[in-house]
Image (tube, rainbow, N blue to C red):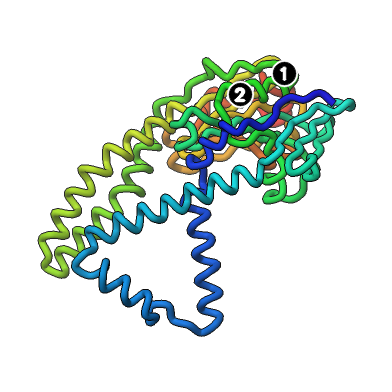
Amino acid sequence: MRVLATADRRWTRYAPLTFWVWGGVLMVAGTVWRIVRATGTEPWRTGVVRHLWAGLGGDALWVSVPLALAAVTGLGVAGAVAFYAGHWWGYRLERGQDGGLVVRRGPRGRNAVAIEEARLYGVALREPLLLRAGGGASVRAVAGGLGDRDQNRRRSVVLPPAPRGEAVRVCAEVLGGAVDAQGLRPHPRAALRRRVVWALGWGVLPVTLALGVLGWLLALPVLGYCAVGWTLLAAPVAYGLARDAYRALGHALRGRHLVLRSGTFGRETVSLDRSAVLAWTFTDTPLSRRAGVVTVTAAVPGGEGGYRIRDISAAEAVGFVESAAPGSLREFLTP
């Protein structure tokens, strides 16, 4: 066995930048709520809740809401650090004698996941928004034989949240050599327009309309002011996220690997062995056809089952797929 990576206690600083900060608290709260409801208890009628509401609720919402958010965040940070430390205690990534990977964790490496070399089709460098802002990333193997989709997502992690440089190094170790993910082919400007329209149309406009209509129906001018304030604050944020999502788009061929990148809240750079791609799917809609873009999906027998090149130029798509898998589209093309 050759050790590729081992745990570092300093990596726990990336735990607060993961889903578990708020998601874990909500999951625990939901579980407690179901248990309480199953006993027939109405929590809002208990003396403790009434006392808290009397002291912090009602006229003191401007104090209670920030305090509640701070308390939830504090609990989430503590829970995320505890979960990270407990889940990845004793982590070790090894290369087996047969060329496969073995991920060990727990006391004496009792929890182990083995990935055969023949079923290893690539890697995915994952950089969610908060983790990316903190300079971190995690790595998943694109592999088959790890169970259904949920089981695959749990078992395919070969590196927990760690410094990005370490994640890039582990990707190179898993692939057997570094794959350049810089200088990927940019996507057409139509892809930017689609993301801006989606961000403003679905992230900003509905709330603005709801506040404006309620203000008009209820004759409350303050709601109209809220609608204007929401638009002025949310529109620049939505536009910035749309531009970030556009800048993340990219694809390229790097030797025997196909490199794909997309996403802003959950950015992912995937390096796939081209020989592992079983099929190619071209997907469009009336709006995307009008914009001259198409989404190409590379189907593989593992990982998520398919990885998308989103909003690639329709004029470029066929040529790119023919370069990645020569002859795969020949029977569908006319001279």
Image quarter of the N terminus: top right
Q: Which residue is drawn at 78% across and 29% down?
A: 94
- Residue 289 vs residue 280, the one in the foreground: 280
- Residue 306 vs residue 137, the one in the foreground: 137
Q: Which residue is drawn at 62% across and 29% down?
A: 270
Q: Give neighbour class at mark 1: few <14, some 14-19, many 20+ (Cα, 10 Å).
A: few
Give the percent coordinates (x, y) of residue 126. 57, 34
- Residue 141 vs residue 235, the one in the foreground: 141
Q: Amino acid under label 1?
A: Arg
Give the percent coordinates (x, y) of residue 109. 79, 40
Q: Is residue 21 left or right of residue 108?
A: left
Give the percent coordinates (x, y) of residue 324. 68, 22
Image quarter of the C terminus: top right
Tag in front: 2 or 1: 2
The reply to whether residue 147 is in sight is yes
Residue found at the far bottom of this picture: 40
Residue found at the far right of this picture: 98
Q: Give the residue at mark 2.
A: 166
**Relative height, residue 102 to residue 205 (above, below):** above
